[in-house]
């Protein structure tokens, strides 16, 4: 490992698992001081302890303004500043066969975490950075926010909003030397997408995954399955001084899925999904 982040302080929300955990590990290896923020103290505290003196854990609900302000203040108090804000925390949505079957009961919670949390993190970290020479803000969206598709409509809408927000606020904050960029991972196996969704039995979930796996593989120009570490490497680039001229970009980490034949890909997904759920 190099020292691309030597002397820098980073906050990573949703840092206890998946992409957040991989990024925390990489950032510490690259010389950063890292505050891991998450609601899962049972995962975050052991991770921070394992990473040593360069890491701290702060229990945080990203949808709560006071807790997010306390998170920024904690990073500054513990490590002397804040140079990097990785707004990575997110949740999925309930699965329904079609939008007309979705009562949208989880709408508020999804928007609060996936969009409001990103906006709070950007604003509160940005206020500190604007007074201290700038910094890098990285927001996690999803391929689901840039490529239209069926199912989990609220989740898709929240991630699309993160993309547009990131591009817009990049313009707003540029005068303060604050760079804002957005990552759109696609089909990265993490804890977020590996558990059985509410309202769906384990057998149905297993059958659905088995049916969709070859469709995802066929749609991906790069046949290698992506990993949280791949997304962490992209975050490292955007956090480091190697990207000082980069702001307002949306960077897919999806093996090329978002550049492919989206119409046929989505039709194949819908057909495979319908057959799996009917079986």
Image (cartoon, rainbow, N blue to C red):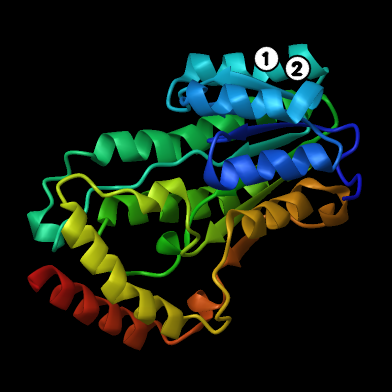
Q: Position of residue 258 (x, y in %)?
A: 50, 75
Between residues 116 and 22, which one lies in front from this camera angle?
22
The image quarter in which residue 98 lies: bottom left
Quick check: can you spot residue 115?
A: yes
The image quarter in which residue 277 lies: bottom left
Above or below, 246 relative to 81: below
Give the residue displayed 27% in from the left and 75% down from the top.
211
Q: Is residue 252 left or right of residue 85?
A: left
Give the residue displayed 59% in from the left and 19% down from the top.
58
Which SS class for mark 1?
A: helix
Q: Position of residue 59 (x, y in %)?
A: 53, 19
Q: Position of residue 79 (x, y in %)?
A: 80, 18
Say the numbered circle drawn on residue 73.
1
How much space separates mark 1 and mark 2, taking CA atoms?
5 Å
Q: Is residue 74 left or right of residue 194?
A: right
Give the residue displayed 30% in from the left and 34% down from the top.
109
Q: Position of residue 99 (x, y in %)?
A: 15, 59
Between residues 38 and 267, which one lies in front from this camera angle?
38
Quick check: can you spot residue 173?
A: no
Between residues 259 and 92, which one lies in front from this camera angle?
92
Kindly indicate whether the residue at mark 2 contacts the one at mark 1 (C-beta within 8 angstroms). yes
Q: Is residue 237 left or right of residue 86?
A: right
Give the residue displayed 49% in from the left and 23% down from the top.
42
Above or below, 43 relative to 189: above
Which SS class for mark 2?
A: helix
Q: Is residue 202 left or right of residue 121?
A: left
Q: Residues within 10 Å of mark 2 (few under 14, many from 20)?
A: some
Say the numbered circle drawn on residue 76.
2
């Amino acid at each position: 490992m190099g020292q691309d982040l030597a002397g820098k302080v980073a906050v990573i929300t949703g840092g206890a698992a998946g992409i957040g955990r991989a990024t925390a590990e990489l950032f510490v290896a690259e010389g950063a001081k890292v505050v891991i923020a998450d609601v899962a103290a049972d995962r975050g505290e052991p991770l921070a302890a394992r990473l040593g003196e360069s890491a701290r854990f702060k229990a945080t609900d990203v949808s709560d303004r006071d807790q997010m302000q306390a998170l920024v203040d904690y990073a500054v108090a513990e490590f002397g500043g804040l140079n990097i804000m990785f707004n990575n925390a997110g949740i999925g949505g309930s699965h329904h066969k079609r939008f007309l079957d979705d009562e949208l009961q989880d709408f508020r919670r999804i928007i609060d975490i996936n969009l409001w949390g990103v906006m709070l993190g950007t604003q509160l970290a940005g206020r500190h950075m604007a007074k201290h020479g700038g910094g890098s803000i990285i927001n996690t969206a999803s391929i689901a926010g840039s490529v239209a598709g069926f199912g989990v409509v609220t989740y898709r809408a929240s991630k699309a909003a993160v993309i547009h927000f990131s591009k817009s606020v990049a313009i707003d904050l540029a005068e303060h030397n604050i760079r804002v960029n957005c990552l759109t991972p696609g089909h990265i196996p993490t804890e977020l997408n590996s558990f059985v969704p509410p309202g769906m039995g384990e057998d149905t979930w297993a059958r659905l995954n088995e049916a969709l796996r070859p469709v995802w593989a066929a749609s991906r120009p790069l046949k290698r399955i992506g990993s949280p570490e791949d997304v962490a490497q992209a975050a490292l680039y955007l956090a480091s001084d190697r990207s000082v001229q980069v702001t307002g970009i949306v960077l897919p980490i999806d093996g090329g899925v978002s550049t492919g034949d989206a119409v046929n890909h989505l039709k194949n997904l819908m057909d495979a999904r319908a057959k799996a759920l009917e079986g």
